[in-house]
Image (spheres, helix red, strand yellow):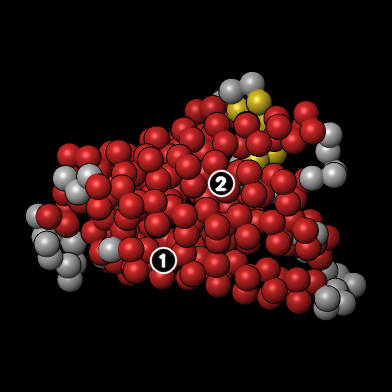
Amino acid sequence: MNELLWLAMLAVNFGCILIAYRLFGRAGLYAWVPLAAVVANVQVIKLVDLFGITATLGNIVYASSFLVTDILSEIYGKKQARRAVFIGLFSLVVMTGLMNLALLFTPAPDDFAQESLATIFGFMPRIAGASLLAYLISQLHDVWAFDFWRQRFPSQRMLWLRNNASTMVSQFIDSTVFTLLAFWGVFPAGVLVEIFWTTYLLKWVVGAADTPFIYVARHWFNRGQIPGEHA
């Protein structure tokens, strides 16, 4: 059942990105980045069993942001994609700060939410820092790598190559940075390796699955079907 829900969530995430782009153009893509960053950092608290492995739930939503930056890089250029990365980073920092500030308030006697909020948003500084740094490094690399491959293979027929070549390596960097910074010294080396590979495997699947969607976005733009945008 979890596997079917995971595939459904994959389709919903990518579908929502395309809907946002079709309805709102570039602004819709910018809106998705902070949304994905915040939702992923909430969902990551939940562990689920998928395809025989234990994984965090936030991998799909988080990985979907790479599709957004690749669409921005492909259609609007490297500068616009980098802007989206920093919008996402800003939203993560502000969300973490505001929610941890809220936890400092003494709850009323009838309050029922404090404990649950503390579980979700009271991240250890090490985990929060690892998440932010992994996000920044991997996203900036994705923007750079996509532009690198686009300059060498500019044909639209090679869009699949620059999309996957940039995303797969960026996902590898993200998983490596987060796992080492968050869990080095906490778990044995064997457990660290398992956490890394299971996390990266799911992100790799998400990255590969987003290829048709970037072609759809490119097609809509070429045909002038994006509001306020023309090829």
Q: Which residue is mark 2?
A: 173
The disc, 2 or 1, on the residue closer to the chain's N-terminal end is 1
Picture mark count: 2
Q: Amino acid at mark 1?
A: Arg
Position of the N terminus, as image quadrant, is: top right
Residue 10's mark?
none
Look at the picture and state if 205 lies above or below 39. above
Residue at the far front: name it: 152
Left or right, residue 60 beside residue 112: left
Q: Quadrant of residue 158?
A: top left
Q: Amino acid at mark 2?
A: Ile
Residue 197 on image: x %, y %: 62, 31
Distance between the Cα atoms at labels 2 and 1?
17 Å
Residue 217 on image: x %, y %: 24, 51
Q: Categorize mark 1 by other alpha carbons within 10 Å: few (<14), some (14-19), many (20+).
A: many
Left or right, residue 12 beside residue 113: left
Left or right, residue 184 beside residue 90: right
**87, 119: nearer the viewer:** 87
Residue 82's mark?
1
**126, 230: nearer the viewer:** 126
